[in-house]
Image: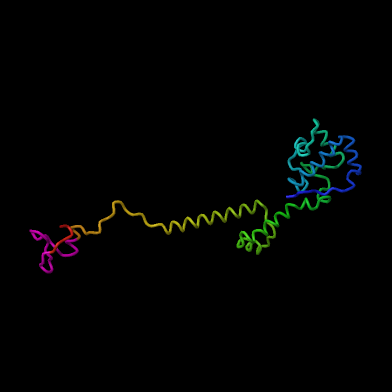
Amino acid sequence: MNTDIRISTNLVKHHKIKRLIRQTGYEGFYSLICLWTYVSLTAVNGRLTNMDALDICLAAEWAGDDCEGFVKVLADLRLIEKDGDDYVIHDWQQHNPWASDAKNRGDKARFSRMAQTHNALYLELKSKGYVAITAEEYGALINDVQRSLTIGQRNASDALAPSPSPSPSPSILPTKEEFVIGDGVVPSGGEGWINTETGEVVETPFG
């Protein structure tokens, strides 16, 4: 983010500034400075995108009633110029190259910080020729990374979760039918059961 702008020491002697003060008073000169500082913070390329006369007056802290008139004075003096549908600050990038390059510097610094915060992603992007990344691109990439991590953690958690136990829990003892068939025993007619292979009376799990 810009913290200053560049102003020539001869600014107050420039004929445009003298005419501006004559037509709008010192308030107009103050508003021009406010407009320049506004641009350095929010429109670093010097373009007043989608800003009408009222928007420009608000950005410039113009306290007068005639916004259209103030903007017309700025335009007539070529302190601002019409470019398509928008106004632009006259020769902004030429007079304030450092301020106008703030976005590019920020994008490069953001990309450099990724080497510490997301090194694998940084190396991948660098291998593809990236030297800078916008805030919007960075946000989208980080969201994708976090979404992938969340899905991976959820899948790992599901894989480690124990299988649900049936209710009620099944008995580990065989049924009478299973015992008879599996172990070759039949009721003895009295107490106990007879092993059909040995002829011995045996106790069963059923009492």
Residues 5 and 173: in front is 5
> Is residue 69 left or right of 107 when viewed as pictured?
right
Question: Residue 155, percent across and down?
Answer: 47, 57
Question: Residue 207, percent across and down?
Answer: 15, 57
What is the quadrant of residue 162 in the picture? bottom left
> Is residue 202 left or right of 126 when viewed as pictured?
left
Residue, x 84% and y 42% (percent of image)? 79
What is the quadrant of residue 85 in the picture? top right
Residue at the top extreme? Answer: 65
Position of 11 relative to 190 (above/below): above
Label tally: 0
State the colouring used for the structure image.
rainbow
Q: Is residue 182 magenta?
A: yes
Question: Residue 63, percent across and down?
Answer: 79, 33
Residue, x 18% and y 59% (percent of image)? 205
> Is residue 1 left or right of 77 when viewed as pictured?
left
Residue at the bottom extreme? Answer: 198
What is the quadrant of residue 56 in the picture? top right
> Is residue 139 left or right of 172 when viewed as pictured?
right
Residues 166 and 47: in front is 166
Position of 29 relative to 173 (above/below): above
Residue, x 47% and y 55% (percent of image)? 154
Q: Is residue 70 magenta?
A: no
Magenta highlight range: 179-201
